[in-house]
Image: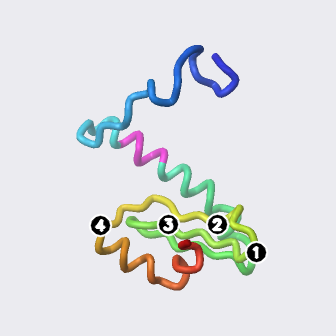
Amino acid sequence: MDGEGRPNGMTPMDFAPVDPVDPVAADVAERADAAFVTHVTWALERTPGMSCRVTPELVLADSDLACDTFNFICRSRLTPAAAERARHRPEVRRWHR
C-alpha cells in the first residue's frame, strides 16, 4: 500500500467507476452516499444555529459559520432544470460562486 491507502503503483484512474446499471454496484454507491450524509449532518443537526435539509434529491448542510469548512451540498440527484432552480434558493445561492 502507498501512503494514500492504494495498492502500490495504482492511481485513482486505475479504479473502475461505479456502473449504475449493476444493481450491486449501485447499492454500494447508495450506501456510501447514505454514510457520507450521516457523517456530514450528524453534528450539525445537534448544534443550535446549524441546519440541514435532507431530501432524496439533495442534501444541504449549513454550519452558519463564517468559513465553509462545515458546509456541504451533496447527494445531488437533480435534473439540469431542477439544478438551475436549486441554484437560486437562498441557502444554495450564498454558497454558489
27 with respect to 54 (left or right): left
* Element on which disc 3 rests: strand
Q: Which residues are magenta?
A: 27-32
Which amino acid is tagged 3?
A: Val
Cα separation between marks 4 and 2: 22 Å
Circle 3 residues within 10 Å: few <14, some 14–19, many ≥20: some
Q: Which comes before the other along the chain, label 4 or label 2?
A: 2
Q: Which residue is mark 2?
A: 71
Cα separation between marks 1 and 3: 20 Å
Q: Which residue is mark 1?
A: 66
The location of residue 94, given as percent across then percent down, is: 58, 79
89 with respect to 23 (left or right): right
Circle 2 residues within 10 Å: few <14, some 14–19, many ≥20: many
Cα separation between marks 3 and 2: 10 Å
Cα separation between marks 2 and 1: 10 Å
Q: Which residue is mark 4?
A: 79
Q: Which residue is mark 3?
A: 59
Quadrant of the rendered image containing residue 26? top left
* Element on which disc 4 rests: loop
